[in-house]
Image (cartoon, rainbow, N blue to C red):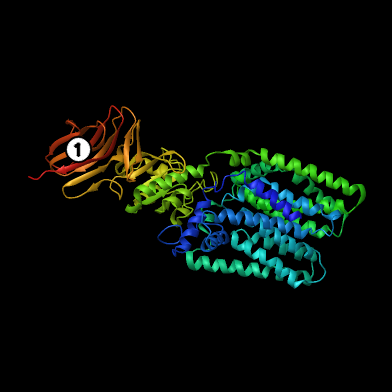
Amino acid sequence: MAWLLGATVLIIHVRSYPVLTYDDAFISLRYSRRLLEGQGLTWTDGLPVEGYSNLLWVVGCAFLAALGVDILDTPVVLGIASSIAAIGAMVYAFAPRSWSDSLPAFAAALFLAVAGPIGLWAVSGLEGCLVAALLAWAVAFLRPLAGAAAVDTKRALAAGVPLALLCLTRPDGPLFTVAACAFMVLWGRSRGALRQALWIGILPGIATLGQLAFRWMYYGDWLPNTARAKVALTATRLETGAQCIVNAGSSSYALWAPAMLALLVAWRDPQRRPRIALVFTLFVVWTAYASSTGCESYGYRMLIPSLVLLTFLTAEVLDWAAAKGGTRRVAAWLGALALLLAFATAQRADPDIKYAREHRPPTTERATTIGKTLRRAFEASDPLLAVDAAGAIPYYSGFRSLDMLGLNDAHIGRQRHESFGEGIEGHELGDGAYVLSREPDLIVSGILGFSRLRYRGGREMRDAPRFLEEYRRVLFGGEEPVPQRFYAFVRMSGKIGIERTEHTVTIPGFLFANKRNTVAELDDANEFETKFEGLAAPTVKGVKLAAGTWHLRTSGRGHLELSVGYGGRSFTGDNGVVELTLPHSGLLDITVVASEPATLSAVSAHRLED
């Protein structure tokens, strides 16, 4: 009954959040999709790079998709199922024998069901709730072993199963096993305690060593690339992590306060002492680790294990109070209800949780528009796309991609600098010269297509002569699933840039969407054309033409005038047509002028025969 109530409340709770609202979720989904397509555990073509930090989640999404679940639904299915499984572990750990002693199970189930991080990450696309479920079941199996005089091999192996899966879910998952085994040894201080710890750790150890071997053989590295691109132990990260914990605590006080009373219960009740000490040890170890990594305040994903462990401690306190019977049991029920109400209210009011719940449209929907729009226009050209945000835009475009922040690029992931660890986690690395050497056809800045290249590699590129010569900034517009205008930097001589034959040069109309009142939008044939929304005179500079007589003209709709600058002179013509003779090859500045709404498909230059 407690599990059913908790699951029902959880389902109601998660419906208040939009799905797949976190861009990094689409990194994992891209790995899952490519795995299904037979391209291995890869993010893009070329040498494989471990740009995910949740192997079991990636494989689980791929497995569900192979069974017929839409791949975009797999993280939601897995997230909700994991949340319900975590509630089930709580009920199992405090299984009531009667209605009178059911308070811990009901309270624990409902605390998890109304927790903002659980509700958010059940549908946001990453592994937080899977970690919650595996940890909850591991603790449920470990609690009876804490302080036990005899070695219980079966229960120890049972605890090792979720711990092993935790090791495969996250690279830092082994921390739980190390902490649990160390506790068993130090608390028991006997050969039996050592054997107990060995039985607990054998499956997680095999899983960890197996993944290390796979990582080395498949990716050629002992560390996941995400660790190289993110992890740093600095004062800034510690300060950020501490602030994250303070923020989380301010909306979780109704859970933290009773959980801390568990220390008093442990002092007064020797039978419960080892169980409480075990859970408290895991809580301290993980919370300290999360603080050292910066914690990531959005949705408190890194603190979900701490929340699960606090729920165990709170349930232990309620179990102790209710066991006293009489008026204390009634008081425990009333106190639990008051705490649940206060917790649920504070969770809904938490600024980070509230933003994720109420922000419409989510950033990922607008990034989805960017990816889908680029795919519709350029799929046949097979361009190379360089991005800062490696999630929704590459996922929906389907293009070969280059991660300019290094999460999915082995070279950039190793370009650490002296100030690494002082900036935003995962947004500090870059190598502008390397990106330019790869000659991407499209460069998109940030998750929404910013007008400037903002991060380290982008800043290195934007003043480089090669970048200024080869790339033009273009304003694009898309409509599906939500209207979104975005900037992209297009390589002039790339696969989607200027087309050349022996006698013809064609400049795509979208390259002229670089001034006020111009935007490149898709036409009925899924080709970009520049829409003039008012008076505008955009220019494409540095178009190289060979010596000879050239006939230039515009194609589009509405009244368009053409002006060509060459050798310090300006050439104009009638009805969007210009003819000029070049004594030798040179660079032209081509301007299209519209004084009223019009559209431009292309500017073509045809060299006349001698």
Q: Quadrant of residue 272?
A: bottom right
Q: Which residue is mark 1?
A: 553
Residue 98: x and y in percent read: 85, 58
Left of 193 or right of it: where is 456? left
Residue 316: x and y in percent read: 80, 54
**Quadrant for the C terminus in the image:** top left
Crowd class of label 1 (few under 14; some 14 to 19; many from 20; radius 10 Å):
many
Q: In front: 312, or 105?
A: 105
**Quadrant for the N terminus in the image:** bottom right
Instruction: Say which residue appears at 33% left-offset and 53% top-offset.
Output: 380
At label 1, which amino acid type do we have? Arg
Q: Quadrant of residue 91?
A: bottom right
The relative height of residue 437 versus residue 539 in the rendered view (above or below) is: below
Residue 417 visible at all: yes
Instruction: Say which residue appears at 38% left-offset and 47% top-offset.
Output: 374
Residue 266: x and y in percent read: 84, 54
Q: How many marks?
A: 1
Left of 302 or right of it: where is 397? left
The relative height of residue 211 versus residue 326 in the rendered view (above or below) is: below
